[in-house]
Image: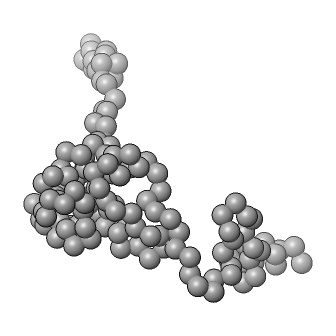
Amino acid sequence: MRRTICLAVVLLCAGSGLAQPLRRPEAPRFSAVVAAHFDQWDADHNATLSPDEIDRLVVNPAIHGPEAAALAAMKLVVRSTKIKPPQLTRDFLAEHSDEPAGLPVEEPGDSTRAAPGQPAAPFRGRPPPHQRLQARALF
């Protein structure tokens, strides 16, 4: 009995020392995924991915994994109302894949936004709940 317990303890200790932590394979970079599939995705072969091409590709059930993630990211960019979407050419996607996707859209009469490089205007609305609770606790 004592031998079996000692053997079990030795095997457990040896097994835990041999176990390697599981490493997740590194996800492919956005620019690498787009570069690998750009010609296939550009249906009209005009060297630009249009919003219509992206819409057709996003609903294609044969596309999944990193390719689907890249297309979903591009769909968010081209459908955004907060930025002026850039033209999604192969060169643009390769050069700017780690940068913001476009320029902020200026809304007419929107005086609450600060100009680039200027401090934001003070918030004049109701404070968020966590700040209201702190203010009550002080008084």
Is residue 9 left or right of 139 when viewed as pictured? left
Can residue 59 be seen here? The reply is no
Q: In the rendered image, which quarter is residue 116 located in?
A: bottom right
Q: Residue 131: image x %, image y %? A: 74, 73
Residue furthest left in the image? 62
State the quadrant of the C terminus. bottom right
Q: Residue 14: image x %, image y %? A: 31, 16
Give the residue drawn at x 50%, y 65%: 103
Residue furthest front in the image? 46
| Coloration of the structure image | one colour
Q: Relative to the observer, which residue lies in front, 48 or 2?
A: 48
Q: Relative to the observer, which residue lies in front, 90 or 16?
A: 90
Number of marks? 0
Give the residue drawn at x 16%, y 70%: 56
Is residue 121 left or right of 66 when viewed as pictured? right
Give the residue drawn at x 25%, y 60%: 48
- Rendered view: 20 above or below 29: above
Q: In the rendered image, which quarter is residue 72 located in?
A: bottom left
Q: Relative to the observer, which residue lies in front, 47 or 67?
A: 47
Q: In the rendered image, which quarter is residue 24 located in?
A: top left
Is residue 63 left or right of 16 when viewed as pictured? left
Q: Residue 8: image x %, image y %? A: 27, 20
